[in-house]
Image (tube, rainbow, N blue to C red):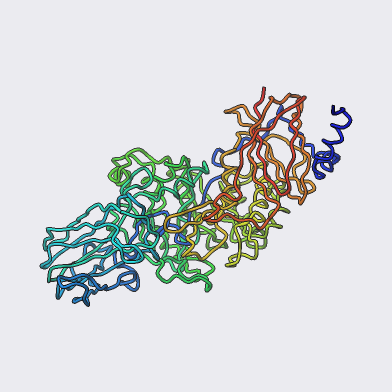
């Protein structure tokens, strides 16, 4: 018979050494004063920033599979190739040709089209999409085109895999001598990441094509011209408070002629003017000369996306300055009326009644109800006297007509220094609403700046942490990684954002999306290819914060001490405390959460991200190698006791009695 002493000795032998050592450590005590909640936290505190960088729109979120569908690229045949095709006598050299023309085009905004000359049946052309077209077994894809014929009456449409095997086919027919829109739906028989589209011609004569499209039928909310489902799902799962769009430096353009003009991105997609994307060759390490903006994803779709994912829209408009890193081209003060009027008209487009000029367009596009726009950004990453002068024109006009609209202004490109200080001096004097700060810094910078906003003026302009990401090597370097080292440093920094909710109104990681085949900038929150996508550790940190926003700040100690970073909020809707604890140490630490003057409920929900390996990353093969894991923590004698693992981020949702 085993004695109590023997059982104890046996249990001791089986107890891991680290657990014994841990039990002897002095616990980290987190004191939470829930009886004295502090400042209110904006419901839009944590959101997302979208920019068409890294092929985030065309080739990404906007799931058009045909590259250069409107033949408006600088090299108008980009993406299009003449192909061998099956004729009546079998495989033979193609007989015919293709060229790009402008005479009697589809419309003035889309002046180029493809002219196909068929000298003999069997002529064919192909398009490989954005380095391959991703199609799935059993799913439907809508092929459409504007066609004008001078002879041929039929166009054969075939989707093939990377080995030339047919996956789907259909045809358009009964063409006339006038531009008309035709479409057919193809059902794909196999999944293929690098499919191609083939157009075959079996009749002699000439034929014109424009807006040649292959588009998934199954889009987000099943909308024609809709968005890619898996990518929107990742955004939806973040529960973002706001959506900032369309950028970023994309707003400014390298020259003013290449700036983002929202009015050319709404209405009929066949009339939206394609322009060069300024991120096509910004960096020598990953040039993409074929990177353009079709604006199939335009301002209407951005507003619609914000509504779909429960986020407030935050559009950013050009302020009369091209990118100050590039040309710094500046609109003269007497030319600024157009820029200011664009802002006034945008508010009408978003919020105006259906009998107003721009409200009518919104209604005609399918959304008679307003989008409830509450804020607009004036300029992106601008600075200096030219910027301040031009902002004042916007402020005078917008505040006079729409005083309820809050204006977001820029603090410049850096989180400190002369430009930053001069901007803040100007915005305090101007009593600006919200100031946008950007920081692409090292993980160490984020760890050492958790108290950044503790010292900010509580009565001055509010802060928008509009772009930030830990750069694991150096800013804009191609070898930056989306690893846990960067993500946990961001998590620690965000405790300071949340803790200072009376100063910091909003925050968003950047950039959001990156194609594995077309990227210029890393790190990024979400990576994707033609079929797959995954969230990075940085994405999950953002999602954990955005999904666990309280309504009021709660005093907590310690805030940042010996590698432990904390923040606490009260969720008055669910009557829960939300305690966030980051252990940025190489060893685990016993943890106790004490609630001052109150007792905790018996159990708390816990979300945990952790890895002792700071270099760990997610991949297509292991998309959740590091991701939040749910568990439960018990409360005994009014105290929640747990172990904060090495390099861990925990969120405790504790019901209050």
Q: Is residue 169 above or below residue 568?
A: below
Query: Which quarter of the picture shows residue 213?
Result: bottom left
Residue 536: x %, y % from top left: 56, 53
Residue at image coords 74%, 24%: 598
Q: Residue furthest top?
A: 657
Query: Which quarter of the picture shows residue 582?
Result: top right
Residue 334: x %, y % from top left: 42, 63
On the picture, is 401 further left or further right than 653? left
Task: State whether residue 260 appears in this view.
Answer: yes
Q: In this view, does 87 lie above or below 461?
A: below
Residue 619: x %, y % from top left: 55, 56
Residue at image coords 53%, 60%: 387
On the picture, is 195 further left or further right than 547? left
Viewer-closest of 196 and 113:
196
Q: How many labels does the image show?
A: 0
Q: Which residue lies furthest to the front in this view?
A: 1
Q: Is residue 591 above or below residue 345?
A: above
Residue 315: x %, y % from top left: 45, 50
Residue at image coords 53%, 46%: 47
């Amino acid at each position: 018979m085993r004695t109590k002493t023997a059982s104890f000795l046996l249990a001791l032998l089986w107890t891991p050494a680290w657990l014994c050592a841990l039990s002897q450590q002095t616990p980290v005590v987190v004191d939470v004063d829930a009886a004295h909640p502090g400042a209110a936290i904006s419901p839009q505190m944590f959101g997302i920033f979208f920019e068409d960088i890294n092929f985030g729109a065309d080739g990404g979120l906007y799931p058009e599979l045909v590259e250069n569908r409107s033949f408006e690229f600088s090299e108008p045949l980009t993406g299009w190739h003449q192909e061998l095709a099956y004729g009546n006598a079998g495989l033979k050299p193609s007989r015919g040709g293709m060229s790009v023309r402008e005479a009697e085009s589809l419309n003035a905004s889309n002046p180029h089209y493809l002219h196909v000359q068929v000298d003999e049946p069997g002529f064919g052309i192909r398009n490989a999409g954005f380095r391959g077209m991703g199609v799935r077994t059993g799913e439907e894809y809508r092929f459409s085109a504007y066609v004008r014929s001078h002879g041929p009456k039929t166009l054969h449409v075939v989707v093939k895999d990377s080995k030339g095997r047919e996956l789907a086919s259909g045809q358009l027919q009964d063409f006339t001598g006038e531009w008309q829109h035709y479409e057919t739906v193809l059902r794909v028989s196999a999944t293929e990441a690098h499919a191609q589209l083939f157009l075959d011609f079996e009749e002699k004569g000439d034929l014109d094509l424009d807006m040649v499209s292959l588009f998934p039928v199954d889009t987000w909310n099943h909308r024609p011209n809709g968005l890619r489902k898996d990518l929107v799902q990742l955004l939806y799962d973040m529960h973002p408070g706001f959506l900032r769009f369309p950028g970023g430096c994309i707003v400014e353009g390298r020259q003013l002629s290449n700036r983002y003009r929202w009015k050319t991105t709404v209405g009929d997609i066949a009339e939206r003017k394609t322009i060069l994307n300024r991120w096509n060759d910004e960096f020598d390490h990953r040039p993409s000369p074929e990177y353009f903006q079709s604006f199939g994803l335009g301002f209407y779709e951005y507003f619609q996306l914000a509504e779909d994912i429960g986020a407030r829209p935050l559009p950013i408009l050009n302020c009369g300055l091209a990118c100050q890193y590039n040309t710094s081209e500046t609109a003269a003060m007497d030319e600024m009326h157009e820029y200011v009027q664009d802002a006034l008209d945008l508010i009408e487009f978003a919020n105006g009644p259906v009998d107003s000029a721009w409200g009518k367009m919104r209604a005609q596009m399918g959304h008679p109800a307003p989008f409830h726009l509450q804020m607009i950004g004036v300029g992106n990453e601008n600075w200096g006297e030219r910027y301040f002068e031009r902002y004042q024109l916007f402020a005078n006009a917008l505040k006079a007509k729409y005083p309820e609209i809050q204006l977001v202004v820029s603090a410049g490109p850096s989180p400190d220094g002369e430009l930053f200080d001069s901007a803040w001096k100007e915005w305090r004097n101007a009593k600006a609403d919200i100031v946008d700060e950007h920081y692409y810094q090292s993980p160490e910078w984020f760890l050492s700046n958790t108290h950044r906003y503790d010292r900010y003026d509580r009565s001055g302009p509010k802060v928008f942490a509009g772009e930030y990401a830990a750069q694991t090597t150096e800013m804009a370097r191609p070898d930056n990684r989306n690893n846990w080292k960067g993500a946990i440093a961001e998590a620690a920094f965000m405790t300071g954002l949340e803790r200072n909710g009376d100063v910091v109104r909003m925050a968003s990681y950047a950039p959001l999306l990156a194609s594995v085949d077309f990227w210029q900038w890393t790190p990024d929150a979400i990576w994707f290819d033609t079929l797959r996508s995954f969230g990075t550790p940085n994405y999950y940190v953002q999602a954990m914060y955005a999904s666990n926003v309280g309504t009021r700040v709660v005093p907590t100690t310690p805030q940042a001490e010996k590698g432990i970073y904390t923040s606490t909020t009260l969720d008055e809707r669910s009557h829960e405390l939300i305690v966030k604890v980051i252990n940025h140490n190489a060893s685990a630490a016993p943890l106790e959460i004490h609630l001052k003057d109150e007792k905790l409920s018996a159990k708390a929900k816990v979300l945990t991200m952790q890895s002792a390996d700071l270099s760990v990353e997610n991949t297509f093969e292991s998309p959740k190698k590091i991701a939040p894991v749910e568990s439960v923590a018990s409360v005994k004698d009014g105290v929640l006791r747990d172990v904060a693992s090495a390099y861990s981020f925990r969120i405790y949702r504790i019901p209050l009695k």
